Image: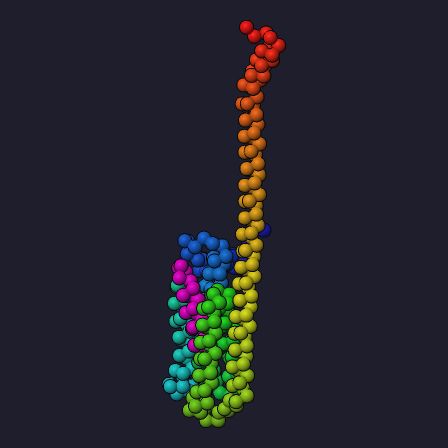
Amino acid sequence: MPPTTLTRLWQRLLQWLLAITTPAAGITHEDTRRRIRLILAIDLVLVLANGLAVLILLAVLNEAPRTMLLYILPSLLAMVMGIAGYGLARTRRYVTGMQITLAGLLLNSYGAVLVTPGPEAFNYTIVIGAIPLVSSLFLSVRRTAVISAVVVAGLALVLHFHDALTRQMFENYMPLDGFARFISLLTVSGVSGVVLIAMRLRDLLEQDRLRAQEKALAEEMRAEAYKSADQVKTVFFASLSHELRTPLNAVINFTRLVTDGHAG
């Protein structure tokens, strides 16, 4: 049965997606290539989502230019940083590309918190809390710890200036109470702490696994060395026995002849 037009389009779309998420040819490690594919996919989703958000905001909002800029600027920055992260992720500098992507996502989330009045701003802390989790998939414990500290400190700063900014943007604004601020910081800090603890445990388990593999390999090599030495010893004594037995037989036989009085 020949493929339909829809099937062909789907196949071409899959081929195109595979092509635009293909790492650099010089990267051969399979696990690294899988991670880079995921980074590239995240970059593309970030760029498309923020581009769509900018278009929707331009079409829907009817605000003053300053307010429009405050709404659109975080998405524009995130889109630009997503493009930069995508370009770097296609090369060997994929770690830098991932960091730029996370920075863009973080700035976008901070901007959304700043321009969202009232308790609804709390919803964006879920996205902010997910940034350390995404970082743990690609970056080291040290880098993730730095990113987590920046995330929590930046959120505290954003929540501090939230009411002052929304008061200027909205006439009937609803301020964030102290409990909402506390819960937001606690949520993000808790997620970051759990992520770092899980990463540390993962690294410890990986180190134990590597040590066990090294120990097993060393024992295997030691057993092979003992076996090889035993084989060399066996061959040596067999050869020595043969080399000694031939002249000794002549000596023994000659001695018997002398003892029996047959020698002249």
Can residue 60 be spotted in the picture? no
Image spot of residue 256 (x, y percent)? 60, 13
Q: Is residue 184 left or right of residue 74?
A: right
> Is 91 covered by the magenta stretch?
yes
Furthest-top residue in this view: 264
**Which residue appears at 40% of the width and 71% of the height?**
81
Please tell me in which quadrant of the rendered image residue 54 appears.
bottom left
Image spot of residue 157 (x, y percent)? 44, 83
**Which residue appears at 54% of the width and 41% of the height?**
225
> Is 134 covered by the magenta stretch?
no
Of residues 241 and 150, the one nearer the viewer is 241
Q: Which residues are magenta?
A: 89-109
Furthest-bottom residue in this view: 171
Can residue 168 be spotted in the picture? yes
Secondary structure, magenta segment, majority class = helix
Of residues 137 and 39, the one nearer the viewer is 137
Q: How is the image coloured?
A: rainbow
Q: Is residue 148 left or right of residue 234?
A: left
**Which residue appears at 54% of the width and 30% of the height?**
236
Image spot of residue 180 (x, y percent)? 54, 86
